[in-house]
Every structure is written in structure tokens, then in C-alpha cells.
Image (spheres, grey):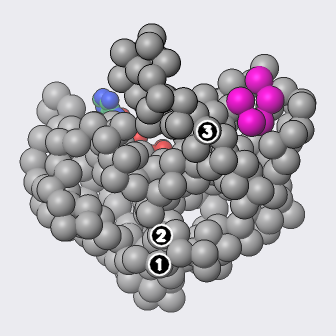
Amino acid sequence: MLSVENLGIQFGGLKAVSGVNYSVTPGAVNAVIGPNGAGKSTFFNLISGFYQPTSGRITFGGEDVTRMPAHKMATRGVARTFQTTSLFKELPILDNVLQGHRLRMRSGIWDAILRTPRLRSEEREARERAAFALDFVGLSPRDPRPVGMLTQEAQKRVSIAIALATDPKLVLLDEPAAGINPDETEGLVRLIRKMVDQGYTVCLIEHKMNMIMNISDHIMVLHHGQKIAEGAPREIQGNPAVIEAYLGGGHRA
Ligand SMILES: Nc1ncnc2c1ncn2[C@@H]1O[C@H](COP(=O)(O)OP(=O)(O)OP(=O)(O)O)[C@@H](O)[C@H]1O
């Protein structure tokens, strides 16, 4: 699985992530939490290849992937979801998943121009994967509605399907429950559990504490870019450094 050693990134004088040692627990729901500005999104951008660290090492499945760009990380089996604002709102569900797949697993430009057999077989495979992924998240590939007309919760499922269509081992979920109501959150919790039951490893950033405590097997807490605690939900809830970080920093529920 994915491990980081002494991981850090600096923006100008700001150490957004610093000296983090951490291993994702395979076959589990791993949560990354922390007050606003703690470095959670930056950490995700580092481990998914969107940012390059200024210090430390990232390994995945025993391979050093420290400077590997995001599309290569996707081919190794690391997929991340984005906020629903990055969906193509005027396109139907299936097209969103196919586009998402193309952007993440792109063939070379010559394949596209020459329509090589590799591209054609990739497209066929992409359609099969998209249908599988949509079925997995409980949506229909034949739904003709533009994605923008679906509920926020259904749009979250589309973004999870885009990640699943790349056939990942590790799925990084960026605030899966943001902007949806408690009933819909229940449905997403069941979907995330199903992902783990079916063999995916999940790592998520989330602000909703109830959800985190309910769903996570393991939690890492960041504060000012540093890891201040990690462990099972019960250990984290009672950890004085964690309580202090949340009371001292502007936590949003
Ligand atoms: N590309 C960037 N350039 C400069 N500073 C950045 C960049 N990305 C993040 N930062 C800074 O790094 C720090 C950590 O930000 P980050 O978004 O990772 O925190 P977060 O824990 O995800 O916060 P939130 O919970 O509010 O989403 C912040 O001070 C932020 O302003």
C-alpha cells in the first residue's frame, strides 16, 4: 500500500505539510482530519501526484513514486475524487465517466490522431469499466440527464464512479459528505463500506465528525501541516492534542 516518509512541501515560507510519516492501512477506511488549513488537501495532492514534495519519499506497492505525476499514479492504482464542481454539468453521467477516464489514463496524442488499435481497445475497455463503476455506485449508464440536474449526492456518486473506472487499488475521497444532508450521508457511508468490502482501500478527507467516527478504521490528524496523532476513532476522540487543535483552531462542522 501507500507509505510516506518525512513527507513535506513548502510554498514560499509556508510549510503546508512537514515531516509526515504515515502508512495507509490496506483494506480499510483511512481518514485524514484536522482543522481548517491543516494541510489535508495538500497532503492528498502530494500522495496523488498533483504536487511534488519538497522533502521526503512516497512509496506505493514497494515502488518509489515520489515524483510520479498524477496520470501515472492512476495507472499504478491510485485514484482520487474531486469536488463535484469539476464534473461536466451539461453532459450525461456516462460521458462524465468516460471523459474522466480519458483525462486520467490518456493515450498518447498519436494514438488519438491515428486511432490505433490500442486506442480502440482502450475505448472499449473504458466503456466496460464505466458501466461497471456506475453500477457499483448505484447509477445507470443509460440515464440521459445532464449531471447538473442530479442531486448533490448523485453527483458525489458520479465522481466516485470516475475514480473506480480507473480500476484503482487505493481511492482517495476528497470530502465525500460535503454539501449533502444526513440521510444522503448515510447512503454514502454504505457505499464507502461496500468499496472496502469489495477490496478497495479508501482514504478520505472529511469534516463531518459523526461520519468520520462512524466509518473510519484508522484516523490520522494533521495540524499546521504536521501529524499530531493517529489511531482508531476511540483513541483519537480522547486524544488531548487533537482536542486542543480543534478547540484552538476554527473547526467547521
Ligand atoms: N498551491 C498553494 N500555494 C500556496 N499555498 C498553498 C497552496 N495550497 C495550499 N496552500 C496553503 O497551505 C496550507 C494548507 O492548506 P490545505 O488546503 O492543504 O488545508 P486543508 O486542511 O485542506 O484546509 P480546509 O480544511 O480548509 O480545506 C494553507 O495555509 C494554504 O493556504
| Foreground: disc 3 or disc 2 | 3
| Above or below, comparing residue 18 to residue 213 in the picture | above
Q: Nearer the viewer, residue 136 or 13?
A: 136
Quarter of the figure with residue 150 = top right
Ligand 1 lies under 8 Å from the Cβ of mark 2: no
Question: Residue 47, how many percent across, how many down?
Answer: 31, 51
Q: CA distance from mark 1 to mark 3?
A: 29 Å
Q: Residues within 10 Å of mark 3 (few under 14, many from 20)?
A: few
The amino acid type of the residue labelled 1 equals Gly
* Circle 1 crowding by C-alpha within 10 Å: few under 14, some 14–19, many from 20: some
Above or below 148: residue 47: below
Q: Which residues are magenta?
A: 91-95
Which residue position is annotated with label 1?
A: 27
Secondary structure type for disc 2: strand
Q: Is the residue under label 1 in contact with that under label 2 (CB below 8 Å)?
A: yes
Taking the image as drawn, is residue 33 in sight? no
> Residue 31 in the image: x percent, y percent?
47, 67
> For residue 189: magenta?
no
Q: Secondary structure at mark 1?
A: loop
Q: Residue at x 19, y 67 (%)?
A: 62
Quick check: 230 above or below 49? below
Mark 3 or mark 2, earlier in chain: 3
Residue 124: give its label. Answer: 3
Task: From the image, tell me which residue sits under label 2.
Answer: 201
